[in-house]
Amino acid sequence: IDTVLNKLGLGKPVLLGKGGEGWVYEYGKDALKIYPRNADIEYLRNTQKFQTELAKNQFTFATPQIYDIGEVDGVSYTVEKRLGGTQMDKKIIGMKTTDRQKLYQSYYEAIRQVNMVTFSDQPYGQIITSANSITTDRWVDFLGQTFEQKIAKTRDRMRPSVTNFDQKCDLFKLLIR
């Protein structure tokens, strides 16, 4: 992290948050996100492309936008639009019922707007692709391939606790078809 901060001339940056993806710092009016080593640069580029397309919609709220992707000594970072606001899970604590209802109403309105977005020129599947992404020309094929991918990762853990596991998987595949 320090190599990126030093390269960008940030002596004592303000940490805005950290999570599964990395650390987010104040970077002027924008935000700087630093990822753990071996971040998938192709995934970040695809995310940037997706966010650029998403920004073309007329939402009543701000959306994320990666402006720049860089790397210093194997550590990847992005410069992104800094979004204002407060996380819902922090804001909702202690709210009155009427205020909570307004908050949920706004949230559902945002979901409605996002659900209106279509990507008709894209195949079925993950819009932001990575090495393990699945895309197909048919919805049924996407569901089948996704099921196979997920079950391959969880089969050994799930089989002991699910009666007739293999038969249930076969039935599920049949239902998908």
Image (cartoon, rainbow, N blue to C red):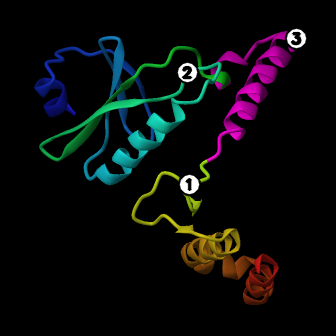
**Badge 1: how crowded within 10 Å, few (<14), some, or many (20+)?**
few
In this rendering, position of residue 18 left or right of residue 144: left
In this rendering, position of residue 168 left or right of residue 6: right
- Look at the numbered discs 3 and 2 and tell me whether their residues touch, using CB distance below 8 Å: no
Residue most extreme to the front: 121
Mark with earlier residue (3, 1): 3
**Does 8 lie within the magenta span?**
no
Q: Which residues are magenta?
A: 89-118
Residue at the disc numbered 1: 121
- Tell me which residue sits at (77%, 76%) in the image: 176
**Badge 2: how crowded within 10 Å, few (<14), some, or many (20+)?**
few
Three-letter code for the amino acid on which mark 1 is drawn? Asp
**Does 105 lie within the magenta span?**
yes
Residue at the disc numbered 2: 62
Question: How far from the left and from the top, in percent, is residue 25?
Answer: 33, 22
Alpha carbon separation for disc pair 1 and 2: 24 Å
In this rendering, position of residue 20 left or right of residue 1: right
* Quadrant hosting residue 147: bottom right
In this rendering, position of residue 21 left or right of residue 12: right
